[in-house]
Image (cartoon, rainbow, N blue to C red):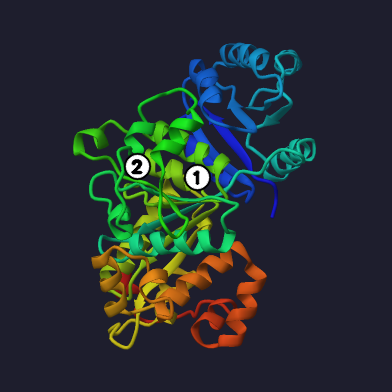
Amino acid sequence: MAQTVRTIVFTANEAQAPELRRTMTSLPQVRIVAELDEPSLLAQAVAQFPCDLLIADLDPSAPVVIECIRQLREAKPDLAVFALSKETQGDLVLKAMKAGIREYLIKPLNLDELEQAIAKITTTSVNSKEPGKLISVMGSAGGVGSTTIATNLAVELADLVGEDKQVVIVDLDFRFGHVATLLDVQGQYTVADLCSTQEELDLDIVRKALIRHETGVYVLRRPHSFAQAELITAAHCANVLTTLQDMSAYVVVDGPTRHDPGGRSVLDAADYNFMVLQMLVTSVRNTDRMIQELGTQGFNTERIEFLCNRLGRESGHLEIDQVESILDRKMFAAFSDDWKNVSASVNIGQPLKSHNDKSRVRQEIRELAMRIHDPKGAEQLASQRGGLMSRLFGGKPSAGDTSHEAVTQ
């Protein structure tokens, strides 16, 4: 896998922002950790978010943006800065280079040129510490089981990495989140306490906020009250997640539950985005609408993988092949309908690994964790077991199903 490049993007051109975002996130190594539209905030953002690259759109106020970059580079001489502009005058390009801008890219942004420029900075920073992987698990609707999957996925990843590395699960449902309930843990501090500062987070404070579960996974709870939830911004949330990535092998987030700029910032920064759906018309419709809206906002929807939950004989009239055709995407994984074990696990506050480690749904979530942590090992396991998991590793979505129109209307 290519080295991750955590990137801050600045542009004052609101109309061009979605296309810039779409181009940036089409490169698998790029993770957007912050987006700005005011040049005076550049220094604050770079101080707040760990990043490897700043991409700054100079238009329409190139002199102002270049001066902000010059001041920023004096404080952060190692930060790579790329400029983007439609202007090609030699004196402007020279002024930009003197300010410390490493690459001057001409609009419209050429993807190959951008990739080559990013390759240069990753080559020169091969010894830098790779951040932990960020995994987002979001539901296509309430009640589809995304919290159960996210929580148990974090537990399985913690088991796979062992005691020497840390796995954290963060509850991003700030009002109704139940990650702590599913693991039956309590603590004084929550994500709201870490979001109370605009400055770089103190690692000792972060460690105090994390609750260690007996399985080895660490939990960052939702806020205690609705009032606290209202105070959390997208910038706060991104700051917490990037800090946790520097401390952990994996950071699993239950959410985002909203698809506003705050929620999208989590998706932009994530290494894996999983959307959970069921074999229900309402769930598939919601999924299709969410994907379309994210695409309109400039998010690269190819970064979203689908997880089918509660699959079984009682799934109704929809089949996986039909839904794959409707969404024009393969399912990344599927989980059996095992209401007895899952409901008991939720009600007693134990992960499936502790409640019934032989249950089928627990084994399927374990396989998902292995696909993330050890893809080759997971593929061998799937081929040995055969069945649905083996099929999900290969093949293409079926096409031409007549139910497409009925579901997506």
Tag 2 secondary structure: loop
Q: Is residue 380 visible?
A: yes
Give the amino acid at mark 1. Answer: Asp
Can you say which quadrant of the picture contains the C terminus? bottom left
Residue 301, compared with residue 363, is above or below; it is: above
- Which residue lies at the image location 48% right of the left edge and 72% below the top edge? 333
Tag 1 secondary structure: helix
Q: Which residue is mark 1?
A: 268
Q: Would residue 260 be found to the left or right of residue 75 on screen? A: left
Give the amino acid at mark 2. Answer: Asp
Name the one closer to the observer, 397 or 4: 4
Name the one closer to the observer, 54 or 407: 54
Residue 149, compared with residue 224, is above or below; it is: below
Can you say which quadrant of the picture contains the N terminus? bottom right
Query: Outermost residue toward the front?
Result: 214
Name the one closer to the observer, 89 or 158: 158
In percent of width and height, residue 215 lies at 44, 60
Q: CA distance from mark 2 to mark 1?
A: 12 Å
In percent of width and height, residue 21 lies at 53, 41
Residue 252, compared with residue 57, is above or below; it is: below
In percent of width and height, residue 133 lies at 56, 50
Of marks 2 and 1, which one's residue comes earlier in the chain?
2
Q: Which residue is mark 2?
A: 260
- Which residue lies at the image location 42% right of the left edge and 31% below the top edge? 235
Q: Would residue 316 be found to the left or right of residue 44 on screen? A: left
- Which residue lies at the image location 55% right of the left edge and 18% below the top edge? 43
Mark 1 closeness class: few <14, some 14–19, many ≥20 residues within 10 Å:
many
Mark 2 closeness class: few <14, some 14–19, many ≥20 residues within 10 Å:
few
Name the one closer to the observer, 153 or 114: 153
The image quadrant of residue 349 is bottom left
In percent of width and height, residue 282 lies at 26, 68
